[in-house]
Amino acid sequence: MMTSVDEVFPDPVGVLWLKGVAADEVLRGLGADPAVGWSRAQWDDDEGRLGRAALFAVESDGAVLIEPRSCVGSDTALLRRLTASGGEALALSWTVNLHVSVTFAAHGGILATFDPMELFAATGDDPDAVAGWLDSLPVTAAEWHHNGKAAAFALGERLTGIHIDRAWLARPHRLVIPSAAAERPVLFLDKQMRELAAADPRIAALAADPGPDKLPEIIRMAVDLALRTTDLNGELVDEVLELLATGERGDRGAVAGERLRSLHETLRQEAQATYERSGATGYAVPGHDTEIGRLMLRQEAVEALRHALDPDLERAASNALDRARATHLSQENGDHLRHRTLTAIQYYIAHGENWL
């Protein structure tokens, strides 16, 4: 394993390691011409002549794609297609803000996708199996947390036998230009989400035809989740629910939004007074187990209502779902899974690609 990934790649890149996938199949999947010629890497192309050009190399039954200006190879729909015939893939990308993303795929499915700093949030096509699968890797949670990029490079080399260092990069490699998928992928939901859709007609209707016309229903369901977990109610809540039911987001919506801001401030002051009466020290923590914690969660529910009234439906859906998640949704009653499923559908509608 190289001593420092950052020495070899001082700038963000996307790297895709593949095993058991034909080279021409990979290039076609990337939207690149399999007959493209060979060229030495032009990593410091200040004039931008190469655009999204990437390096592609094949050694034995392993292959690697290195994208200095994009991360097409991390697309989960692409990874499913490339590994559908029995191959394996590991995709790594990071940003200038040091956000790292790792995805493992095999046999047409996503085994795990995660930020190495947040393994607890790792997901995959079978969420119940993700933690166990990650534990089976020769990388500990501490190693992922300490240097996720180095851990991914070690696993990529283990998968393909390709050791990437400065000397390897200096050799001639095939130059390709990956392109985004021309066709919109089909909505993908993991196993738990599909089971929920089979049991919940509202979710099923959204998943069957996920288009912009479904955003108002997603917004209403996000609000339902926030209200249910916090027991927030009252005349103002009823008025907002009526506005959401009728789709009215004009003057009445603006007035209701201001009243929600006032309610949020009232709840904040109540939480502060409760905290001071308790004699507690340190930071107050939102949660369902304390009075101050519940007041803080109700503030998040109010924010979900306020964002739900945004005239921009895509923004309203995204922000209402974010605030609903912040109310600490229940695992036991299925609301946490409902939220994940709604998020996957909303993301697909907004971006034309799959969240997972």
Image (spheres, rainbow, N blue to C red):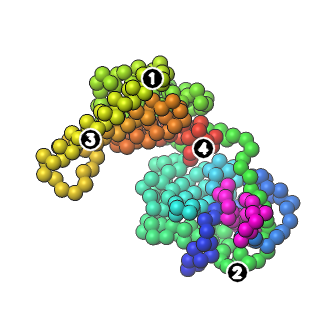
Q: Amino acid at mark 4?
A: Asn
Q: Which residue is mark 4?
A: 354
Q: Earlier in the sequence, mark 1 or mark 4?
A: 1
| Tag 3–tag 4 contact (CB < 8 Å) | no
Q: Secondary structure at mark 3?
A: helix
Q: Position of residue 310 (x, y in %)?
A: 48, 32
Q: Residues within 10 Å of mark 2 (few under 14, many from 20)?
A: few
Q: Amino acid at mark 1?
A: Asp
- The magenta segment is 44-73
Q: Earlier in the sequence, mark 3 or mark 4?
A: 3
Rendered view: 308 above or below 238: below
Q: Earlier in the sequence, mark 1 or mark 2?
A: 2
| Tag 1–tag 3 contact (CB < 8 Å) | no
- Mark 1–mark 2 distance (CA, rounded to whole Å): 64 Å
335 or 7: nearer the viewer: 7
Residue 233: name its quadrant.
Answer: top left
Q: Is residue 330 visible?
A: no
Q: Which residue is mark 3?
A: 268
Q: Position of residue 217 (x, y in %)?
A: 50, 27
- Mark 3–mark 4 distance (CA, rounded to whole Å): 37 Å
Q: Is residue 310 visible?
A: yes
Label annotation for residue 167: 2
